[in-house]
Image (cartoon, rainbow, N blue to C red):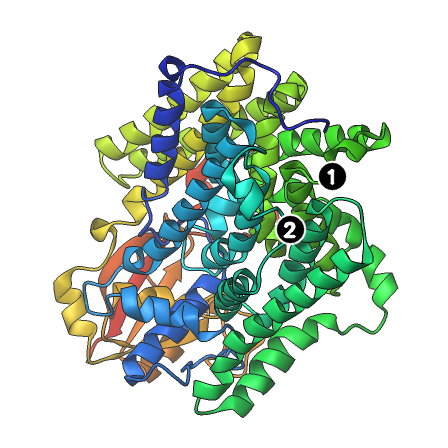
Amino acid sequence: MVSTAHPRTPATDSTLWPWWILLCSAVGLYFFGLSSPYAPTNGDEMVYIHIARLTAASGHWLPLVSDLENMRNTKPPLLFWQAIASGDWSAQGSLFSLRWPSVAYTLLTTAALAWMTLRISGRWRTALLAAIIFLAFFSTYRYSRVYLTSAPETFWLALPMWYLLWQQSARPESALASLAPPGRWSAPVYLLAGLVIGIGLLYKSFALLAPAAAALSCALCLSQGPARWHTFLRTAWGVGGCAVVALGVFALWFVVDPDPQAVWREFVIGENAGKLQTSSYWQAAWSGDYPLWQQALAYPENAGLLLPVALGLCGYGLRAAWHGHWRTLASTPQATLLVWLLVWLLVFSIPSQRSARYLIPAMPAFAILLAMYWERLARGWFVAVLLVSVIALTLLARIGWVMHNMDIGSGLDVSITLWCAALGLAACLGGLLYAGWTRHSTLVATLALYACFSAMTAPLSGAQAGYSPSVQARMQPLRVAVPNGFNGQYERFAFLLPGATLVPYDAESRNSATLRPDLPSAERLDYLLERFDAVVWLEGDVSQTQVACLPRCEVLAQRWHVKSRHRAGEVTLSNVWQAQQWLFGKELLIISKP
């Protein structure tokens, strides 16, 4: 990594329209299938929705409310207040109303990084490329699109870094360069930085102050040129005051919550301090569940399908550092981006529990650097992406076709799925055959893959895939036993059966003290029907025409569901093409006959 300038001549406006079309397509893709229960997400999402729904039902902003054991103060209140403000908890409520604020935060972050890339590189095409790359990262699509904390924390924690980059990218002759030299911040700027970081902490955790403050202080010191004691001390005092303000904002939770002891016990000790405890730290760091070597690959892992290209950028940077090119980067925006990435990686390598997800707030910096060096990376990295895309798109198209043959969805549904797959495969073919198309075909293929997945799951997601209004009305006063494979996953039935009292049972027959997971399937269904007004029962064999409880019970309604976990040997090379044998099951709503 030698300079911030792009090696090619600036693009004219007449050549930018394909990039604008691709960016608009990526933005539209973030709203496509947003209300789907099958949108790529994380298991914690339903836990957060559960807490937000019960807190809203309590009529109070605090304390947070949950029926899940040891899962109440699992996140600070801003995430749940956002859901209370945006969510529609009536019978017409949907996941869309809970998720759209995350998309809004993500698009604001995308606009900020595109603008900053334009200031640094001076090229519109590079700016648009950075925005598209960021939206094409799987970490962005998975964690910054649905109801999770990643989108708001990324937006708020990045604001001080954007301001510093804005200062650094000013022209030397401009008024900004003389009035606000990079790194020499005034007290009001540090105060504002503390306030915005504090808001980010109130979305996720006070622990994020460590990487945010460390990255900011290192970038500020580096931007002021050669190290001097007075520079270091001035920056230390400023960032220290900024950290105090941020912690003060976070501490408001303890002030306004009626039960601050529970916040300390459940969040500070249980949710955060527990991640620093291990009996053999160094042994676990090399061979445990969260090894250091795996954390070192966090940024490529977050890139998802673009992982090979991300590895190419990392290799390029290591070679540049080996040849001493890093010495030319001091006091440049590029150095700030590198500090942003390296400090977050180092800080989150310290806890005993490590995850690539913790580094998502630094992915905007990675997207900018990847866009700036996009043309310099070897073609082979992009070819690897295209080859993987061919396999994934073909499999998704096949699953869509199988669903159509099983009468899941309409002809229009399968047509959209196949069209998205065809578009992605055409991009892959063009990129493999023509070297000039290879790099940008990877972006088209990646976005087409996301679109194909959303289109494929659309028949399982809309109103046509739910229970009828008459069935929902009948279930409202009843106690319904619903399957639960993971903490809080039964919360999805609150959207399918609004108003019903939901009681989860272990759908995977793991050890449990309640609802008898040890019983055989038929006996367990009878056991549940004796104790509840209705049961949502998962039938794994799609060829099964009758349930074991007939004629003592009645099947009120049925719908398709996708199996999330499979037994050993259920999916093999011999049947992977026959998705109907291993991917789908029936979900039956059953009541006992009087």
Q: Where 342 falls versus 205 (above or below)?
A: above
Image position of 119 (left or right of 184) = left
Q: Residues within 10 Å of mark 1 (few under 14, many from 20)?
A: some
Image position of 67 (left or right of 166) = left
Looking at the rendered structure, the kind of residue marked 1 is Ala
Q: Where does label 1 land, which residue?
A: 330
Specify the farthest residue to the top: 434
Between residues 252 and 505, which one lies in front from this camera angle?
Answer: 252
| Marks 2 and 1, how far apart at CA | 12 Å
Between residues 457 and 433, which one lies in front from this camera angle?
Answer: 433
Label 1: state its secondary structure.
Answer: loop
* Residue at horizontal 58 percent and vertical 23 percent from the top: 387
- For the question of whether residue 189 can be seen, the reply is yes
Nearer the observer: mark 2 or 1; the answer is 2
Disc with the residue nearer the chain's start (2 vs 1): 2
* Residue at horizontal 60 percent and vertical 41 percent from the top: 168
Residue 76: numbered disc: none
Quarter in which the C terminus is drawn? bottom left
* Residue at horizontal 35 percent and vertical 81 percent from the top: 61
Q: Where does label 2 land, which residue?
A: 183
Q: Quadrant of residue 450?
A: top left
Between residues 261 and 292, which one lies in front from this camera angle?
Answer: 261
